[in-house]
Each structure stands twice: as C-alpha cells, then as structure tokens.
Image (spheres, helix red, strand yellow):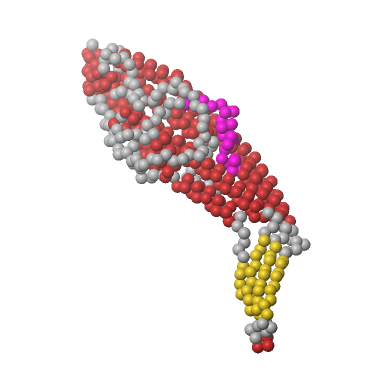
Amino acid sequence: MFRVATIIAVISLCTSAGCRTVPRTSVTEHRSGTAAANRTFVATTEKSRSNVRTVAFVQPAEEIEESSSESEPPEILPSETRDARQAAPLTLTDLEDFAFQCNPTLAAAAARMEAARGRQLQAGLYPNPVAGYHATEIGNLGTAGQQGGFISQRFITGGKLGLDQAIAGKEIDEAHFRFHAQEQRVLSDVRVRFYDVLVAQRRVDLTKELTRIGDNLVEAAKKLLESRLGTESDLLQAEIRAEESHILLDNAQNQNTEAWRRLAVVVGMPAMQMTGLAGELDADLSDFNWDSCRAMVLSSNPVLNAARTRVDRARFVIRRAEKEPIPNVDVSVSVRHHNGTSSDVANVQIGIPIPIFNKNQGNIQSAESNWIAARNEVQRIELDLQDRLAVAYRRYANARRQADRYSQQIVPRAKRSLELVTDGYQKGQVKYLTLLTAQETYLQVNLSYLDSLREFRASNAIIEGQLLSGSLMDQP
C-alpha cells in the first residue's frame, strides 16, 4: 500500500510540473499591391477530393488531466489559428500574383519575345539606296572633267525578304512558347515552395509539442529516481529522447526559415517578412493515373511546342537557302556635267551575280541537316518528358498511397490508442509515462503524415506543371 501511495504522489508531482508551450511571437505581414497579372498560359487539371484527415496539434498532458470529464484525445488544430498566425495569412493565389509581377525571369522572357518581334521587322526591310558624288576626267584639257552624282539600289528577288520574315516569325512563336514555359516554371516553383512552408510551419508546431513531452518525461523520470521507483538508466534514456526532440525542433525552425526564404526568392520579393500562410495540405487532393498524367504533360507542353516550332523554322531556312542563288539586281544611275563639252551626260548600270560556282549548295545541305536534327530533337524531348514523368509519377503514386494509409489507417489507430490511454490515465489505470509516450507516438505519426503530404504536394505540382520547374535556373 505504501508503494502504491508513493507512485500516486510522484505522478501528481510530475503532472503539476508539466510545462506549457510558449506561444510564438507574431510576425509582421509584408504585403504589396497585387493587381492580378494577365496569365496567358496555366495548365488546368481536374482534382478530386479525398477524405484525408487534417494534421494538427496534441493538447498538453496537463490540460488532458484537467479535463477529466472528456475522453476525447487531443484534437489537431489548424496552424493558422495559433498565435504565430495572428497576421492576415497569405494565400497561394496572393503569392502567384506577386510572382507574376515581381519575378524577373518573366520580364526577361517577355523582353526576349519583343526582341524576336524586332528581328522580324528588320528582316523584312529593303536595303537602303546609296547616293553619292561622282567625278571623272578631272584635269582633262585643263577642265574639271565630268562632275555629278549617282544613286544605286539593290532589288531583292525570289521572295527572300518574305522568307526572312517567315523565319523570324517562327522565332517569335518559339519565344512565345518559351515565355509560357517560364510562366509555368514560376507557378510550379511557387506552388511547391508554398506547401513546403506550410509543412515547415506545422512541423515547428508539432516538434514544439514533442519537445514539451520529452521535457516532461525527463521530469517524471527524475521524480521516480528520487523516490527510488525508477532507475538511472530510465532517466538517461528520457534525457536522450528529450535532447533528440530539441534537435528536431531546431532543425524544424531552421527548415521553416529556409523554406520561407526560398519562397520569397522565387516570388521575386526576397525581403518579404515571414508570415502565416492560408492553405490546407490535405484539401482537394488529386487522383491521377498514368494515362491522364502522360496526356497532361505531353498535351500543349510549351517546351515541346517550342521544339516543333524550330522544325517549322528549319523548313523555312531550307527554302530560304534554295532561293539564295537567285541573283539580286543592282541598279545604279548617275548624272554628270561634262565641263569639256558643256554637256550633261547620264549613266545607267545594272548588274547581277552569275551563280556558276557558288549556288549556295553548302548552306542548303547545312539547312537540311539542321531540319533533320530539329525533328529528332522533338522526339528526344517527348522521350525525355516521359522518362522524367515516370520518376515524378512514382513519387506521386507512392506519396498518394502513403497519405491515404496515414489518413485512413495509421492516424485513426494512433488517435484511438491515445483515446484509450487518456481514458485509462483519467481513471488511474495508466501511468503518466505511458500517457506521454502515447502522445509522443501520436505526434511522430503526424510528423510522418506531414512528410507524405509534402511529397504528394511537390510531385503533384510538378506533374500539373508539365514537369516544368527551376524558374531561377539559367534556361537554354
């Protein structure tokens, strides 16, 4: 009886010694004007809902003890309701709008498109005429000879200027598709990093609870050791687990900072202050199969369309090379005054190159080879997209199954286990250490669930973005 009374006393002391989580300091929201940018290309897909449970936080053990009339386990609260989310949170749409306005790669891609339009304009312009002064027989018979002026013009034949403009027009089309590709890269990066931050913020909250539980375990082990009901080995094990939980918290906080900085950079606002995000990791989860993913990636893919445009351009280059031997006509007219005879004379000169030796056969051969290379490049890109899609779809399918298993099997079981342990603890049938261990297990399960949701969101964004990402990388 004395031993039982001692255990109950120690448990009461441990319960009262439990520490509460210190709320995070609220941060200042950084918002700028958000006039929605015109979007000329956004891949749209059908998304299906899934009954995946929401990740949240575990209620502290001392609060469970105080609410002895309730047998429900701690509910996981949406992270935006925490103290750290007091500022108005940013949505994914907000960040996409910021990126369309501030990401410099989009302005650069638009400028390259305008540069292509300038080249097309230049390609259709006629050569300027040449005008000048002309003098001959100066000093003949003590006179100034023939003095006058001339004007000459080259006439482009064979429709060469039209073909030059057609070639430049295809370059405009290619620049247009490259702009669309860059838009999609920016969207994909923003979406991936948005969910990275959302996961990182919730991971910080969960690891804080895990750290609190670890510290409570250490305090409980110390009390048991002091009352000779525990061993030093138990205390050391509890301290190791507590230190590991603090490492996890440090890593989670650093990961949160890194994720926010990377999101701010891809948006184009690196000085944007950290704030909360409004979004649900487990809402509107898509359910794709291989065929739908393959069609989504290959259909109207801007990179593939740009390659096909290069094939069309190569055809025009062949035609232009075949027209090159058709001689252009040079016409020159001059008018001079003959000072020796006091008469005015005129001179007309017309010249054309004779394509005897050089019929542009080397450039024709080069253009035909480039056309063959461009056609094969289209096939290479198609194969490369399917190769990368195989990897992305494997990630997507694995993460989807894991998320489903966690939401439908593992999380409910961990929750039910915690319900039973909580009920037993409230009835005095379960030790305090067992309750803390059950809470720790529940938190670890939710952390793993977060990992699966992060992987799912990343792979889903990449597939919906037609495998286009890396917007800040130098594009060929």
Picture quadrant where residue 193 is located: top left
- Image-based side of 135 in relation to 467, left or right: right
- Residue found at x 36% / y 42%: 33
Which residue appears farthest toward the top when viewing the image? 1
Quadrant of the drawing holding the N terminus: top left
Picture quadrant where residue 62 is located: top left
Image spot of residue 391 (x, y percent): 55, 33
- Residue found at x 50% / y 36%: 42
Which residue appears farthest toward the right when viewing the image? 356
- Residue found at x 50% / y 50%: 111
Nearest the eye: 283 or 415: 283
Q: Say whether residue 303 is magenta.
A: yes
Nearest the eye: 451 or 316: 316
Magenta stretch? 285-307
Q: Is residue 451 visible?
A: yes
Give above or below for 437 relative to 322: above
Give above or below for 213 relative to 123: above
- Residue found at x 68% / y 54%: 159
Image spot of residue 190 (x, y percent): 44, 38
Picture quadrant where residue 350 is located: bottom right
Give above or below for 443 relative to 377: above
The secondary structure that dominates the magenta segment is: helix
Q: Say whether residue 255 is magenta.
A: no
Image spot of residue 118 (x, y percent): 55, 53
Q: Is residue 224 visible?
A: no
Number of on-image labels:
0
Image spot of residue 410 (x, y percent): 43, 20
Give above or below for 27 relative to 219: below
Which residue appears farthest toward the front when viewing the image? 343
Which residue appears farthest toward the bottom when viewing the image? 142
